[in-house]
Amino acid sequence: MYKYGFLFAVCCFLNIAIAQTSSLNILWDPNSEPDIDKYKLQRAVNSTTSFSDFTEVSHPQTSASDNSVTPGNLYAYR
């Protein structure tokens, strides 16, 4: 069984960006819980409500890259 670190509060997004290149770097503060195994990131494209699974990152890493963005689109991560 995995424990996931939560990257956001219910009302807040980890990161919102408008792509101007073909990649975005996503950064966040680490979760202080000692038993976190990984972070599960979700992404929404041109929306702030319709998220889908994007990637998983092992703790304690606090960054990820999105290399599949299209310039001009709005991306939100949580």
Image (cartoon, grey):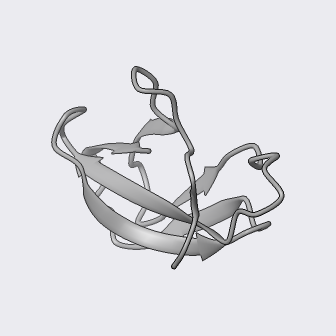
Which residue, as the protein is rendered here, is positioned at the far front? Answer: 1
> Does residue 12 appear left or right of residue 35 in this picture?
left
Q: Residue at x 41, y 49 (%)?
A: 20
Q: Residue at x 44, y 44 (%)?
A: 78
> Does residue 61 appear left or right of residue 24 in this picture?
right
* Residue 41, picture quadrant: bottom left
Please, is residue 34 above or below residue 68 in the view?
above
Q: Nearer the viewer, residue 76 or 59?
A: 59
Q: How many marks?
A: 0
* Residue 52, picture quadrant: bottom left
Task: Give x and y (percent) for residue 45.
Answer: 22, 48
> Does residue 1 appear left or right of residue 27 in this picture?
left
Task: Give x and y (percent) for residue 54.
Answer: 36, 67
Q: Residue at x 50, y 38 (%)?
A: 15
Please, is residue 21 above or below residue 66 in the view?
above
Task: Give x and y (percent) for residue 58.
Answer: 67, 75
Task: Give x and y (percent) for residue 14.
Answer: 52, 38
> Does residue 38 appear left or right of residue 32 in this picture?
left
Q: Nearer the viewer, residue 34 or 55?
A: 34
* Residue 64, picture quadrant: bottom right
Q: Residue at x 75, y 43 (%)?
A: 29
